[in-house]
Image: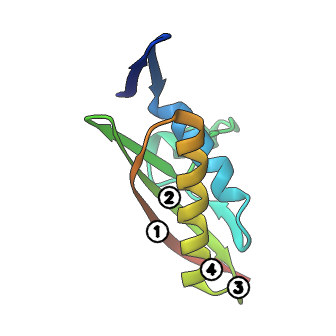
Amino acid sequence: MAVKTSNIYGKINISDFAIAMVASNAAMECYGVVELVSRRLTDSLIELFNKTSYAKGVKVESVDNKINIDIYAILRDGVSINAVKESMASTVRYNVETFSGMRVNNVRVNIVGVKV
């Protein structure tokens, strides 16, 4: 799927993969995030062949031009989980909305683990 919009300049289509790349980069910049982990089989297969998945750990769904984002992350030990979740959700929402010009409906941050 893709997010579609139009204005006086024409029609704009943004793929879910492009949105996932922006969300992944924004999430990795947050304090306390060690890495994003894959929850999809395709990302695991890409890692087996030493390829880089730029949207690893991010799932984007766009339904009726509403963007829903799921992020799967591992955090550093000793950080406040709730503070990092809130920071990550707001950072990802801001970056995706700035990039796409569309409103993000929901950002769900899933903490998979904690690394020492």
Quadrant of the rendered image containing residue 83: bottom right
Q: Are marks 1 and 3 in contact (CB under 8 Å)?
A: no
The amino acid at mark 4 is Val
Which of the two labelled residues, at mark 1 and mark 2, occupies the earlier sequence position? 2
Dot 1 crowding, Cα within 10 Å, few <14, some 14–19, many 20+: some
Q: Are marks 1 and 2 in contact (CB under 8 Å)?
A: yes
The label number, if any, that marks residue 114 in the structure image: 4
Q: Secondary structure at mark 2?
A: strand
Given the current orientation, which residue lies at the most extreme left position? 64
Say which of marks 4 and 1 sits in front: 1
Q: Nearer the viewer, residue 39 or 62?
A: 62
- The percent coordinates of residue 36 (x first, y second) are 61, 58
Residue behind mark 2: 71
Which of the two labelled residues, at mark 1 and mark 3, occupies the earlier sequence position? 3
Q: In which quadrant is the N terminus drawn? A: top left
> Distance from label 1 to label 3 (Cα)?
16 Å
Q: In which quadrant is the C terminus drawn? A: bottom right
The residue located at (42%, 45%) in the rendering is 103
> Distance from label 4 to label 2 (Cα)?
15 Å
Q: How is the image coloured?
A: rainbow
Q: Secondary structure at mark 4?
A: strand
Residue behind mark 1: 110
Q: Are marks 3 and 4 in contact (CB under 8 Å)?
A: yes
Dot 2 crowding, Cα within 10 Å, few <14, some 14–19, many 20+: many
- The percent coordinates of residue 4 (x first, y second) are 38, 24
The amino acid at mark 3 is Asp
Residue behind mark 3: 77
Is 72 left, or right, of 62 in this rendering? right
